Image (cartoon, grey):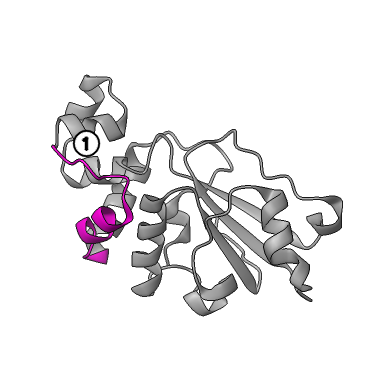
Amino acid sequence: MRLKLSEYKACICEGAAENAIIDILIDAHLLIFEREEMLEEQVIRCREAKKFEERYLRKGFGNQISIIRILDSRRENFKLSKAYEHKVDVINVITAPEIEMLIILNEDKYKEYKKSAKKPSDFCLQNLKMANVKSYDFVYSYFSDPEILVKAIKRYTEVSKIQKGEYTLFDLIK
């Protein structure tokens, strides 16, 4: 199921780690869209639909906008007002349970992680001795080679229980 995006894109990331991953992929030209197609040419860190509307949608775009939300929760709502519903296509890209799974997979510690019954971030901290796994700088540095990141994303899709109709980071890669 290939993603179909509008001319304008807004890429909203839940956290700093997700932001770093999108920056790495987009700067390496590995995504199905380019930075120049993004609102303000950068990742947006605005999780509330109302604030997003006020800040970005009131600029009067003539064309449709795809909002690509990178988040780990399937329950987080992003309800736009009726005035904008028809102009905006919201695409949720789920990274459940947590983006730190990419590090666990890259370190080849998935089996160990599954046995631990820990949250991915706790596993990274306690077992892998990586304290800043949620920070932009750590993730950007850790995945400085985009090909390693892409391999981890592919591996993630192999081991994850992806729900029907759900998108993952893999769907954003060319």
Residue 165 in view (yes/no): yes
The type of residue carrying mark 1 is Cys
15 lies above or below 2: above
Residue ranking furthest to the right: 83
Image quarter (top left, top right, bottom left or bottom right) of the C terminus = bottom left
Query: Residue 47 placed where, x, y %?
Result: 59, 48
Confirm whether the magenta stretch covers residue 138: yes
Which residue is painted at 68% across and 63% down in the image? 55
Confirm whether the magenta stretch covers residue 4: no
Left or right of 65? Residue 45 is left
Left or right of 173? Residue 130 is left
Closer-to-camera residue (25/54)? 54
Instruction: Say which element carries label 1.
Output: helix
Residue 110 in view (yes/no): no
The residue at which mark 1 appears reads as: 124
Report the span colored magenta: 129-146
Left or right of 45? Residue 63 is right
